[in-house]
Amino acid sequence: MTRRTMLHHIGVGAATVVVAGVGAGSYRVFDNGVLDAGHGTAYDPWTNWRDDATSLGTVAAAILAANPHNTQPWTFHVTDDRVELFTDPARRTGALDALDREHHVGLGCALQNLVLAAAARGLQPSVTLLPDASDPTHVATVSFAEAPMVVSDLHDAIDRRHSNRGPYTDEIVAADVLATFDSLVAGLDGVGIRWFATPAERAGLGAMIIEATRAIIDDEEQSTESFAWIRSSRDDTDTQMDGLTLDAQGLSPLVLAAAKILPASTRSAGDSFWLDQTRTVHTATAAAYGIVTVADPDDRAAQLDGGRLLQRIHLAATVAGLGLQYMNQITERIDRDAQLGNPSTFAAAMDALIDRPGRHALSTFRIGHPVRAGRLSPRRPVSKVTR
Amino acid sequence: MTRVPPKLLILAGRLAAIGGSLGIVTGIAQATIGSRIPEWSGNKDQPVALGLLTIALSATTLAAAQALRRSTASRDSVMVRVSVWLAVVAAVCSTTVGRLWVIPGLLLITAAGTTLAACGWDQFRSEVTSNWLRSLLGILGAFELLMAVSAAPTATIAAGLVAGAALIAAAVLAGPDRGLIVSGLVAVTLPFAFVTWWAIIPPLLSIIAFAIGIAATRVPATRSAVPNVAPPDLHSPGHTQRSRRSAPNGR
Ligand SMILES: Cc1cc2nc3c(=O)[nH]c(=O)nc-3n(C[C@H](O)[C@H](O)[C@H](O)COP(=O)(O)O)c2cc1C
């Protein structure tokens, strides 16, 4: 074999290996939906939510609400003049939400969207929380009376609201903007907001969130429960239509594509990634934190009203062009400690940070001017959540 | 002299014709009622675009079937390419119309296998090894098609399909005297690479296609490794045709 032939063979061999690599990559691009993020049946509810003008249409808006780990823990019973909202106990997150606090806060978020959508359809909503003392799964009934249509900015933002887990710019959120959010408590009983906007306040809360994240990762049951809701393949998203996707992690387009092309990460790799993002992106770029406070965080009605307030704030933030991400690691640890009978270190530290006698944290979020827009999360269609 | 094709090739041609016709029917079904039968049609986001693609690719297998029926001993290279093409269409369309593709896909794969059996493994190997770089270019085209069918919106799908088709055309045309045409065809992959730059693989594929395209037009194909043999008895079914010395790049 001459030197030239040998070089030729080496070149052809190298080209073959490279083409095989591109083939593997192309297959991942195809299989994991890299080129059509946010498209498909699992995302259709974001586009067709206004189509139905009847009471059933209010459910189409309700299912677009924020909810813990995108578990979509709801079932609706719909008639012409009312919608009854039930929990779906099969969609709890176990040790991660040890006392079902987030489960009910998420239902409150859905309730808020439902109410806004009813008003926009000329149905005056009247909400009764926990209407049946003998059935704790029946969390609310919304009765409708005919009324003029009221289409609010918050209503119109329903399909633009997304959890934004990406970086925020260093632009501050003006105090008067935060003050307008305070007025969103109108009509809700016993819920309030405590803002953490100064650098010292942010640093204190951010450090505690990182510590709580570590504690969750170290708690195998919590970590496993959280991992169960991660959807790292397109097939999983298409079939289950729930859970946390790579698309929703706020990554840059290039990093997102690489993450989808590479093999799915293990639980421990996912945990390290989450801790890293919490440290270097979520807490590092938060322009402000808000904590929804209540007198008794275990009270179901307070959880539902707190959820309604959170959803209003998130919608208002969307209208104002702000990004928002829930960051509930501390309260997840507070409830877990209570469940296990551990010393309530996080509860005491959080109360000290809030520094409002008689008020306790229900749910925490960060807010700021986002570097990039949040992306869609999958949703199960109305037909799958109504009975 | 035109020879009568062996029975195996006639059979392959019939299988390809039936597979291609059924493929067109599945494409029409996908484009028209695909969204209403998601469990059969693969629950695709772009049923119309994918249906049209299936129709177009299936139509090419009808042309391939025709080529098989008209084949002569001197066109072994054509048969090898037809066989590969049938397999590519069977593979690509398995991602476009869901379960509807099972029967056409099986027919086309069987047709590809039968064609291969008629040509003979040695002939296939010889064709592929003597046109390896061109084959790689065609394979890249198939990968491009695969990515295109999973894309959105429709304009991106269209750009990807054009890019994939262009690469396959470049693979067919590549030769020492065809540098410009091949470069032009490879350049057609750029719009798809541009609109999907962040997805890493499409731009990478374009760059590699350029490199391979240039190499394929510079390096004359090596001669067939298969020795010349006397013309086979083409009437005996299952007889393996042996290659004649093929022209550079199999043309
Ligand atoms: C009660 C509650 C708790 C949540 N906790 C977190 C959290 O700790 N971290 C986070 O990134 N998102 C959290 N989320 C956001 C959800 O994961 C998100 O709403 C869900 O995945 C749906 O996505 P979307 O908000 O973009 O529609 C929480 C949401 C709710 C309602």
Image (cartoon, grey):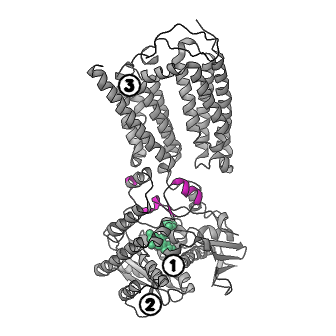
Q: CA distance from mark 1 to mark 3?
A: 63 Å
Question: Which quarter of the rendered picture does the C terminus of chain A lie within?
Answer: bottom right
Asked whether A252 falls inside the magenta stretch, the response is yes
Which of A97/A291 is in front?
A97
User: In which quarter of the view is residue A78 placed?
Assistant: bottom right
Whether label 1 touches label 2, CB < 8 Å:
no
Q: Is residue B205 above or below residue A202?
A: above
| x and y percentages locating residue A238 in the rendered image | 57, 56
Q: Amino acid at mark 2?
A: Arg
Give the answer, above or below, for where A177 lies relative to B183.
below
Task: Name the image quarter holding the N terminus of chain A.
Answer: top left
Q: What span is in magenta?
A: A230-254
Q: CA distance from mark 3 to mark 2?
A: 74 Å
Q: Position of residue A377 (x, y in %)?
A: 51, 62
Assess whether mark 3 and mark 1 are in contact (beta carbons under 8 angstroms): no
Chain designation of label 2: A
State the SS at label 2. loop
Badges 1 and 2, same chain: yes
The residue that disc 1 covers is A98
Callout 1 amino acid: Ala
Callout 3 crowding tier (Cα within 10 Å): few <14, some 14–19, many ≥20: many
Report crowding for label 2: few under 14, some 14 to 19, many 20 or more residues within 10 A (C-alpha).
Answer: some
Q: Which residue is mark 3?
A: B216
- State the CA–CA distance, disc 1 to disc 2: 21 Å
